[in-house]
Amino acid sequence: MAGNTFGNLFKLMTFGESHGVAIGGVIDGCPSGITLDFEAIQEELNRRKPGQSAIVTQRKEPDSVDFHSGIFEGKTTGTPIGFAIFNTNQKSHDYGHIKDSYRPSHADYVYDKKYGFRDYRGGGRSSARETASRVVAGAIAKQFLSGITFNAYVSQVGDLKLDKDYSELDFSLTETNPVRCPDPAMAEKMENYIKEVRKEGDTIGGIISCVIKNVPIGLGEPAFDKLHAELGKAMLSINAVKGFEYGSGFEGVAMKGSKHNDKFNSDGTTQTNYSGGIQGGISNGMDIYFKVAFKPVATVIQPYETIDKKGNMVKTQGKGRHDPCVVPRAVPIVEAMAALVIADYTLINRTIQR
């Protein structure tokens, strides 16, 4: 299986399966001499881990990370950073009923056809549990990028949409509710709706918005390696993501160019920011902001009809512990992938002679 590594200079390779012994990764290219805040790294994992509230999967995992290389006396050495997160609460028997059949809208069918074999326990490598490794790497990238801030939050669940510009929001409120929406009134509505959907044995999708502040001018390349293209790739690599837009996004098509153009101030900043902090594929120093759309979780706790390995139609039912809505736990994943991109392009910029 190819495609387990992300990045150019700041690289992350992940390994492991949902119901295996452990998941983990190797970070290659992290600069030396960075003093790491291990509590901050664990806190990022705590934001993603299962069982943290009544509206997420009740799988109980501590998600404690063990580092095995690349760190000495609390600082990075510049060598590969190896780490592991051991699985402790697998219930593989919950998946025995799908050993010979395929769940709709999961990777089961295509995995079996592509590789001729699959780990049916929780989806194996295709499980969203793999993203915990990304959160570890993203937490280290954030510490490397001191001064640059990443603020992701839930802006929509189903039809419940937060119609406020991010400049009107207090990001300190994001972590004060289980939905991770910085608007308390909307957060309560979203939480109640997710609980209703869960009682029905169903799932619902949502949108995560992200704002990156204090990004220097010059990150990104003008052709194939545009900064927004890499951010799009990063976000679309996250499980359940169906869409990505930055800046004015799809709404910008209804605007005339005279309105959409970001006029300059004398210091090089712009009066508006429809460009989303990126012009010509290169950061311009303004806030980078984007949205990521997540589909409803594919596993519904309802009876359904599907096919088995022989092509027979069979009836089965979703079992196990699953999120009724993935976006609350995906907030730190979006931040982590954004941090990996910015860290990578920061290192690439260091190789350019001026």
Image (tube, rainbow, N blue to C red):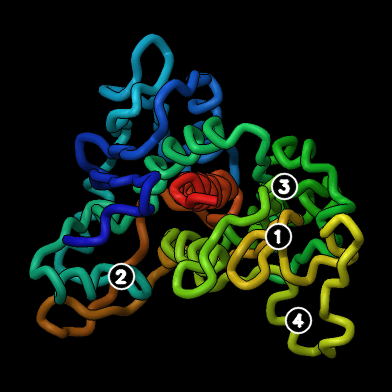
Number of other residues with Cα within 10 Å of mark 3, as a class: few under 14, some 14 to 19, many 20 or more = some
Residue 174 visible, this orientation: yes
Q: Earlier in the sequence, mark 3 or mark 2?
A: 2
State how far apart marks 2 and 1 are (Cα).
44 Å
Number of other residues with Cα within 10 Å of mark 2, as a class: few under 14, some 14 to 19, many 20 or more = many
Residue type, numbered disc 3: Lys
Tag 4 secondary structure? helix
Query: Viewer-nearest of labels 1 and 3?
Result: 1
State how far apart marks 4 and 3 are (Cα).
22 Å
Q: Say the numbered circle drawn on residue 103.
A: 2
Q: Earlier in the sequence, mark 4 or mark 3?
A: 3
State how far apart marks 3 and 2 are (Cα).
40 Å
Q: Which residue is mark 1?
A: 284
Q: Earlier in the sequence, mark 2 or mark 4?
A: 2
Number of other residues with Cα within 10 Å of mark 1, as a class: few under 14, some 14 to 19, many 20 or more = many
Residue type, numbered disc 2: Arg
Q: Quadrant of residue 83?
A: top left
Q: Name the image quarter holding the N terminus.
A: bottom left
Is the residue 286 above or below the residue 240 in the image? above
Number of other residues with Cα within 10 Å of mark 4, as a class: few under 14, some 14 to 19, many 20 or more = few
State how far apart marks 4 and 1 are (Cα).
21 Å
Circles 3 and 2: CB atoms closer than 8 Å: no
Q: Quadrant of residue 100?
A: bottom left
State how far apart marks 2 and 4 are (Cα).
35 Å
Q: Could you tell me residue 73's position as x and y percent?
A: 39, 9
Residue type, numbered disc 1: Asn
Q: Could you tell me residue 2's position as x and y percent?
A: 20, 61
As drawn, is 159 to the left or to the right of 110?
A: right
Query: Viewer-nearest of labels 3 and 2?
Result: 3
Q: Name the residue nearer the viewer: 226 or 81.
A: 226
Query: Viewer-nearest of labels 2 and 4?
Result: 4
Q: Which residue is mark 4?
A: 251
